[in-house]
Image: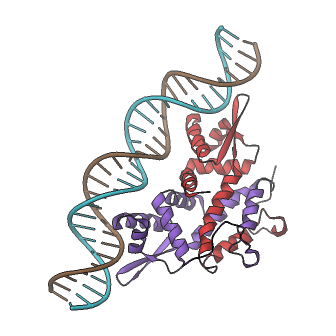
Chain colours: A red, B purple, C cyan, D brown
DNA sequence: TCAATGTTTTTAGGATCGTTGAAACATGGA
DNA sequence: TCCATGTTTCAACGATCCTAAAAACATTGA
């Protein structure tokens, strides 16, 4: 990810409704959610949710597909991981001691890593 | 990190000059840089850099200390790691397969982790 | 084709943000 | 104290963003 896209992603995530929507879609998984369902859960009007979804889509954080009458939105996990990589990148240019806190994140936020799944985060088990 | 602070941090990072300043300070390490030096490197006016540094400070991304005539700013690595943790948090609520790309980041972006320092990122060695 | 449902676009407004230059403030040395 | 240096605050303006409501568009079934 280059600086331009990082700026775009940060801008997209700096708005309350959009951040909520993205987290909603991240939790929803690859199946995604229909625009209407998102609007209902976020408690905003359809036109407003459409506006914010477009912003998220332009930032590359979500994708959309039409299924019959509904338009289904889902999170782009690759963009999220790219953003995290971007955030870690420059840390590595400084001395290792400086970025020790980030190393801790790497080792502790291991919810996604099979062999270290000992509830390092306060995340609850997967349901559904 | 809660949602409120995450929003504040995203807003702070969504501006080109501020993102550049933060990356500059991350690379500079705990020693930090004087406001004047930052202004010079970022090629913005002193008043402008002061404005942006205040925003970064309010978001908790930098701290300042006075040394004689200069005010030295340095990156708050804990806030950065907190942001990364926040970004990974919800990923874990979905199925593990969904967040595999993030797991890859964790294992590959290992520049900070001593035992896996094999240039997984395209980051160049530290110069200067 | 017509009506119903789901979503997007458009328009307009008010609010917030970023930049600039001048003035003010803080510090250290003569 | 006075001056030089380094930084911050202030006020004003233009640009951008967010929201709301109405209209337009797309899809499906009668």
Give residue B36's position: percent from left, percent from top: 38, 73
The answer to whether C14 appears left or right of C1 in the picture is left
Give residue B64's position: percent from left, percent from top: 45, 76
The answer to whether B100 appears left or right of B49 in the picture is right
| Number of marks | 0
Question: Splitting the image into 4 quarters, where does residue B70 fall?
Answer: bottom left
Asked whether residue A121 is in view, the answer is no
Give residue B75's position: percent from left, percent from top: 52, 73
If the image is split into quadrants, where does the N terminus of chain A sit?
A: bottom right
In the rendered image of this protein, does residue D14 appear above or below residue A66? below
Q: Identify the residue at image location x=57%, y=77%.
A: B127
The answer to whether B25 appears left or right of B89 in the picture is left
Q: Residue furthest right?
A: A115
In the rendered image of this protein, does residue A21 appear above or below residue B9? above
The front one of C17 and A98 is: A98
The front one of A30 and B43 is: B43
Asked whether residue B68 is in view, the answer is yes
Give residue A2's position: percent from left, percent from top: 59, 57
In the rendered image of this protein, does residue B90 appear above or below residue A36? below
Question: Splitting the image into 4 quarters, where does residue B17 fall?
Answer: bottom left
């Amino acid at each position: 990810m280059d600086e331009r896209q990082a700026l775009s992603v940060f801008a997209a995530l700096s708005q309350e409704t959009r951040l909520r929507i993205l987290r909603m879609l991240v939790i929803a998984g690859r199946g995604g959610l229909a625009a209407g369902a998102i609007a209902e859960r976020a408690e905003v009007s359809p036109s407003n949710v459409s506006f914010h979804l477009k912003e998220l889509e332009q930032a590359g954080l979500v994708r959309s597909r039409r299924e019959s009458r509904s338009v289904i939105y889902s999170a782009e996990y690759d963009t999220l991981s790219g953003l995290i990589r971007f955030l870690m990148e420059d840390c590595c240019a400084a001395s290792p001691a400086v970025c020790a806190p980030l190393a801790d994140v790497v080792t502790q936020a291991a919810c996604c890593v099979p062999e270290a799944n000992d509830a390092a985060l306060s995340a609850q088990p997967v349901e559904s």
